[in-house]
Image: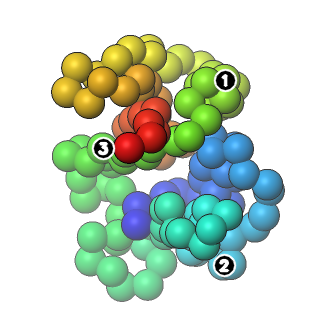
Amino acid sequence: MIGVADVAHSFAWYQSLFGQAKTHPAHDYFGQIIDTDGTVLLCLHQWGSHEHPTLASPGHAQPGNGLLLFFRVDDFDDALRRARTLVARIEEEPGVNPATGTREFALRDPDGYYVMVSELTAI
């Protein structure tokens, strides 16, 4: 779960990144990005809604500091194309991670979180 300024906006952004059909979050303060098999990929919670101590305000810390959102996708090239339409600049252009042997790239989401997208390879 990450704190976001605008749940609906971030919800649509992540659905676009993952190539999902457009839906709406369950609430204006909370939404779950869910894969086609029902797996919850990411929860989005509006800053300051409810009394969660670590979601009180982005002003209490640098948003994204110490956090890297990491997603593995089975449509890497398509995800990269979608990512390029969502941001003005890719933070880390596609390359091969020497530790995993998989391609990956990074971008920032609307709230400044660093998002790493990695190619899913068959085991």
Question: Which image quarter: residue 94?
Answer: top left
Question: Which image quarter: residue 110?
Answer: top right
**Mark nearer the viewer, 3 or 2:** 3
At x 36%, y 64%, the residue is 57
Query: Which residue, given by chain and number where applicable, does mark 3 sit on?
Result: 68
Q: CA distance from mark 3 to mark 2?
A: 25 Å
Q: CA distance from mark 2 to mark 1?
A: 29 Å
**Any part of residue 83 in sight:** no
**Disc 2 residue type?**
His
**Disc 3 residue type?**
Leu
Where residue 81 appears, as percent x and y from the top left, is 66, 23
**Disc 1 residue type?**
Arg
**Residue farthest toward the front in the current orientation of the protein:** 123
Question: Which image quarter: residue 32?
Answer: bottom right
Query: Which residue, given by chain and number where applicable, does mark 1 sit on?
Result: 81
Q: Residues within 10 Å of mark 3 (few under 14, many from 20)?
A: few
Query: Which residue, given by chain and number where applicable, does mark 2 sit on?
Result: 27
